[in-house]
Amino acid sequence: MPQIEGSSRHQLQIFSLEQAIAADNPVRVIDAFVSTLSLEELGFLLKGEGDEGRP
């Protein structure tokens, strides 16, 4: 019985999430809205701004 050959697992495949989402998808509106928010003004602490912990 011959061996079934599939795709090579040693090849790198680059996947872009940006290309996978359609231009008219509602998630793009949500992403644009969230990008305009000031997280600091909403009370969120940005990671890495404190003196404690590893650099």
Image (tube, grey):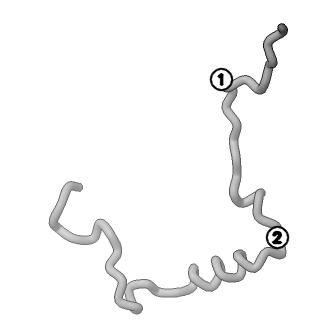
In the rendered image, the vertical position of residue 11 relative to residue 38, given as above or below: above
Does 50 sit left or right of 25 as displayed? left
For the residue pair 6 and 38, the one nearer the viewer reads as: 6
Of badges 2 and 1, the one in the foreground is: 1
* Chain-order first, disc 2 or disc 1: 1
Kindly give the residue lying farthest to the top in the view shown.
1
- Dot 2 falls on a residue whose secondary structure is loop
Mark 1 is surrounded, within 10 Å at the Cα level, by few (under 14), some (14 to 19) or many (20 or more) other residues, namely few
Residue 23 percent coordinates (x, y): 82, 70
The residue indicated by pointer 1 is: 10
The image quadrant that residue 32 belongs to is bottom right
Work out which residue is located at the far front of the displayed protein and give it.
Answer: 1
Q: Amino acid at mark 1?
A: His
In the image, residue 26 lies at what x, y percent? 75, 79
Towards the viewer: 29 or 2: 2
Q: Residue at image x 79%, y 12%?
A: 3
Mark pair 2, 1: CA separation:
32 Å
Q: In the figure, 42 relative to 31: above or below?
A: below
Mark 2 neighbour density, 10 Å: few (under 14) some (14–19) many (20 or more): few
Q: Residue at x 18, y 60 (%)?
A: 53
Picture quarter containing residue 14? Answer: top right
- Locate residue 16 relative to residue 37 in the image: left or right: right
The x and y percentages for residue 13 are 70, 37
Whole-percent x, y for residue 27 in the image: 70, 76
Judge by depth and name the residue closer to the eye, 4 or 37. 4
* Residue 23 disc label: 2
Disc 2 marks a residue whose amino acid type is Ala
Decide: marks 2, 1 in contact (CB < 8 A)?
no
Q: Is residue 14 above or below residue 55?
A: above
